[in-house]
Image (cartoon, rainbow, N blue to C red):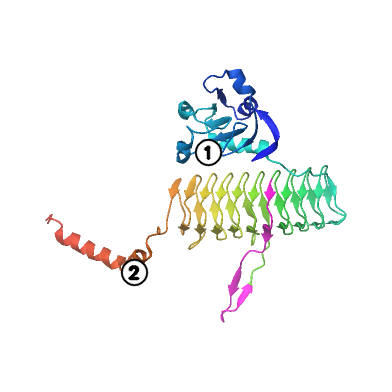
Amino acid sequence: MAGSRKLTIGELARLVDGSVQPATGRTLEQAAAQVVSGIAALADASADQISHLSSRAYQAALPATRAGAVLLRADDQPECPVTAIVVDNPYWAYARITQCFEVMPSISPGVHSAAHVAASVEIAEGVFVAAGAVVGEGCSLGAGVVIHAGAIVGAGCQLGSGVTLHCGAVLADGVQIGAQSTIHPNAVVGAEGFGYAPDDRGHLERIAQLGSVIVGKNVSVGAGSSIDRGALGDTRIGDGVKIDNQVQIGHNCVIGNHSVICGCCGIVGSTTIGAHCVLGGGVGVGGDGPITLCDGVTVSGMTHVSRSIEQPGLYSGGVLHAESRRWKRNALRFADLDGLAKRVKKLEKRLAPDTK
């Protein structure tokens, strides 16, 4: 998709610390001076667009690409029929270059007349507050904060410089959001945590949630996601954390710096997740007692994490899909697995050589 900007291949290469390798018949100067105005997939890109090869799954599309240039690793360059920008990490380079062609709406600083901003709010330079937004008493809005239509900021919230709240995002009272973080549409940060205590009749007594939520710098909270406030202490989201859509993070959780939580994850309260962890889509974290994941843990999609993980690495769980009748037969056999294991153990003892 083309944006409004036009950049040379040389400019893009410098942006990602890449090396320009001209196509056959072209000089380095000619290749670096070529202008591109967008980015597209290998199979679809035209001569005025840049593309990337970040996965072996798309290797077959490289020899026939018509892109103006391709971001790739050095060992893929010989198969590239067009100019290459050789980098160590093509996917990272692709991510950075997409930002060059992103078309953002023009925003002029100011508070819309149809917004409701309390008189006690501290507003730094360059803040934009759209129609229908509400900012409560005692809030602090850092330089360049953008609050889109219908977003709600509760009393006493602190927003660092460059924070963006998209339409319908909600911050409950006392939430802190670090600089350059983004809260996407209809996300809720600081809602009451889920805490109830039963009496002797089984009637549930609400536990007041007295903490808050502290979100670090350069964090992204996806659309429709919820981060609950702490019961006593605070729920804490580290710097650089990326949270996908439809994620639930319970009260008093701690998410370490630069971790990734993919869509539809559910994380029970008081869970601690280390730095540079990845939870795949649909992962559930919950078991007996608080759970801790050390730094560098990756959990594949739909896995249920029921106990702490103390060593970095890739962890998986669940049952893979199969033809329905076969899956049902295997599911019925699963109920007999314990008995089968006991019978095998007895058989092994019977067949074991006599060591006396």
191 within the magenta span: yes
Distance between the Cα atoms at labels 2 and 1?
46 Å
Q: Residues within 10 Å of mark 2 (few under 14, many from 20)?
A: few
Residue 210 image position (x, y, % from top left): 68, 62
Local secondary structure at mark 1: loop
Q: Which quarter shows the N terminus?
A: top right
Give the image quarter of residue 252: bottom right
Q: On the image, numbered disc 2 is attached to which residue?
A: 332
Q: Which residue is mark 1?
A: 43
| Amino acid residing under circle 1 | Ala
Q: How many marks?
A: 2
Give the residue displayed 58% in from the left and 78% down from the top: 199
Q: Quadrant of residue 223?
A: bottom right
- In percent of width and height, residue 256 lies at 57, 47
Residue 312 higher or lower than 233, as above or below? above
Judge left or right: residue 340 versus residue 74.
left
Q: Earlier in the sequence, mark 2 or mark 1?
A: 1
- Is residue 94 located in the magenta-colored stretch of the structure? no
Q: Which mark is residue 296?
A: none
| Front of the two marks 2 and 1 | 1
The residue drawn where x is 57% and y is 82% is 201
| Residue at 51 percent of width and 21 percent of height | 24
Whether residue 211 can be seen here: no
Q: Is residue 175 left or right of residue 98?
A: right
**Residue appearing at x 81%, y 46% in the figure:** 127
Query: What amino acid type should be assigned to the residue bearing mark 2?
Result: Leu
Q: Nearer the viewer, residue 172 or 291?
A: 172
